[in-house]
Image: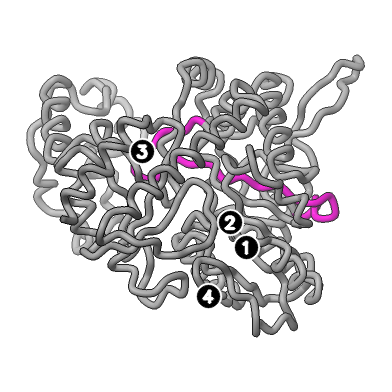
């Protein structure tokens, strides 16, 4: 079969003659021989496309079970929600399949309008007036919120609830290590953040998850009071599906809302690409990271969409920019906009309600099993933590053999010393979405009972 580079010998000879060398090796004559690879790469022979497909399929067959064959009760930041065919059909149009924000509005009105609609929907979910064109994922959005708080206050101390997803907190710690900011992780007590005894002096941001990663419904009013006493920003890290039934971040007085948009049309795909949601109060608009699409009029008075407030951005302000982010997740954002538009307000409320009802039914049934107890007693939305008599990892492996993805073992999710829960090796985090049927839930309970007894 042909080489990857499709040049004929005649074309190669002509190019070499043009640059004045007689061989391909001559192109690298200036590179010392001591650092050049001798003998070429030890690569296998090329394959036909069917042969390559068979090899890749063989790799996939090594999995204990295909992900699509497991009934999914796992969550911890990535959720198995229904994606209607209309969402894939519209978001999959070739005009939308890009991760980039268009620079030329005169030839990209369709994409820019779709992003504008996405921003409008995120702002409504957050209960805040301004949203950007998206960020890479929820963790990135959190870091950008901390950066915004530093810019707004001139301070570097960030109070982050341990109820924020462990991976998000890890990204925040990485950010702080490079910027000199101080990230203080505030512990949980029975699933809720214990703000008592926290010193508010010098605080730039107070971050609370609503609900938190254990599924617990925190009280953002406590975090708001703390942020207000310190003169810092309140950042709410929210579950966007919960916005269908819970108060918005803005109604709690949040200055910034961040979230993970994966539940809105993005499939579970081993970690990404995902979608960072970011909205803020109007006072912070000039510190908003990333792209913003705005609505204006062209020279003929027609409605037009453009990227706006560009002076904040890296390609213009360089080191004085509000953020290093200078792109977005257009495809994921358009997908989320299509899904939210398809659901509407009542549809999102129904999805959230079905999630909560299924989760509470499953919780009630599982906690009747000997060897299963609530890990926390606080109210929850659609995700809950259970303490098992056996190591959670063993239980997850055993239920996978029965075709059930039982949840996430917390000791696989949390770093050693995590201040969100004690003895995580015995704790299983379980999530329920609107996709789970009563029959699937009842079978989960039967299999769990058999495994533990």
Crowd class of label 3 (few under 14; some 14 to 19; many from 20; radius 10 Å): few
**For residue 390, which quarter of the picture?**
bottom left
Q: Is residue 141 left or right of residue 8?
A: right
Magenta part of the chain: 265-287
Residue hosting label 4: 187
Q: CA distance from mark 3 to mark 1?
A: 27 Å
**For residue 103, which quarter of the picture?**
top right
Crowd class of label 2 (few under 14; some 14 to 19; many from 20; radius 10 Å): some
The answer to whether residue 34 of the structure is visible from this angle is yes
Secondary structure of residue under mark 4: loop
Q: Residue 398 at what x, y percent from top left? A: 16, 50
Q: CA distance from mark 2 to mark 1?
A: 10 Å
Question: In the rendered structure, which disc, 1 or 4, sits on the residue that comes first in sequence?
Answer: 4
The answer to whether residue 272 of the structure is visible from this angle is no
- Residue 266 on the magenta segment: yes
Q: Which mark is residue 267?
A: none
Q: CA distance from mark 1 to mark 4?
A: 11 Å
- Residue situated in front as seen by the camera: 444 or 301: 444
**For residue 294, which quarter of the picture?**
top right
Frontmost of labels 2 and 1 is 2
Q: Is residue 72 left or right of residue 164?
A: left
Question: In the rendered structure, which disc, 3 or 1, sits on the residue that comes first in sequence?
Answer: 1
- Residue situated in front as seen by the camera: 32 or 121: 121
Compared with 36, 333 (above or below) is above
Question: In the rendered structure, which disc, 2 or 1, sits on the residue that comes first in sequence?
Answer: 1
Picture quarter with the N terminus: top left
Residue hosting label 1: 208
- Residue 58 on the magenta segment: no
Q: Which mark is residue 269?
A: 3
Residue hosting label 2: 217
Frontmost of labels 3 and 4 is 4
């Amino acid at each position: 079969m042909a080489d990857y580079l499709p040049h004929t010998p005649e074309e190669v000879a002509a190019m070499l003659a043009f640059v004045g060398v007689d061989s391909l090796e001559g192109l690298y004559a200036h590179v010392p021989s001591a650092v050049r690879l001798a003998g070429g790469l030890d690569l296998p022979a090329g394959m036909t496309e069917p042969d390559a497909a068979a090899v890749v399929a063989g790799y996939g067959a090594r999995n204990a079970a295909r992900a699509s064959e497991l009934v999914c009760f796992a969550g911890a930041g990535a959720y198995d929600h229904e994606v209607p065919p209309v969402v894939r059909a519209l978001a999959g149009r070739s005009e939308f399949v890009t991760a980039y924000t268009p620079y030329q509005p005169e030839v990209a009105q369709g994409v820019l309008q779709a992003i504008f609609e996405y921003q409008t929907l995120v702002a409504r979910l957050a209960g805040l007036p301004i949203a950007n064109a998206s960020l890479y994922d929820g963790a990135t959005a959190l870091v950008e919120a901390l950066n915004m708080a530093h810019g707004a206050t001139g301070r570097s101390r960030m109070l982050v609830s341990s109820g924020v997803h462990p991976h998000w907190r890890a990204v925040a710690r990485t950010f702080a290590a490079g910027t000199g900011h101080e990230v203080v992780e505030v512990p949980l007590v029975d699933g809720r953040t214990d703000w008592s005894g926290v010193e508010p002096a010098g605080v730039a941001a107070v971050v609370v998850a609503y609900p938190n990663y254990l599924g617990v419904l925190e009280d953002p009013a406590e975090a708001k009071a703390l942020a207000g006493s310190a003169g810092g920003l309140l950042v709410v890290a929210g579950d966007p599906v919960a916005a269908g039934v819970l108060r918005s971040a803005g109604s709690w007085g949040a200055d910034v809302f961040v979230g993970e948009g994966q539940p809105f049309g993005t499939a579970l795909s081993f970690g990404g690409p995902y979608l960072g949601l970011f909205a803020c109060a109007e006072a912070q608009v000039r510190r908003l990271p990333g792209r913003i699409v705005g609505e204006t009029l062209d020279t003929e008075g027609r409605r037009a969409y453009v990227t706006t407030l560009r002076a904040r951005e890296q390609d213009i302000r360089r080191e004085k920019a509000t953020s290093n982010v200078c792109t977005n997740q257009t495809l994921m954002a358009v997908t989320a906009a299509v899904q939210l538009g398809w659901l509407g307000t009542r549809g999102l409320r129904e999805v959230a309600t079905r999630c909560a009802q299924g989760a509470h039914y499953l919780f009630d049934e599982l906690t009747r099993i000997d060897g299963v107890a609530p890990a926390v007693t606080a109210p929850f939305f659609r995700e809950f933590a259970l303490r098992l008599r056996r190591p959670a990892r063993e239980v997850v492996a055993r239920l996978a053999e029965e075709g059930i993805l039982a949840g996430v073992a917390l000791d696989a999710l949390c770093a050693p010393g995590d201040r969100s829960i004690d003895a995580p090796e015995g704790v299983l985090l379980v999530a329920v979405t609107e996709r789970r049927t009563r029959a699937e839930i009842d079978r989960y309970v039967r299999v769990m009972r058999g495994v533990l007894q």
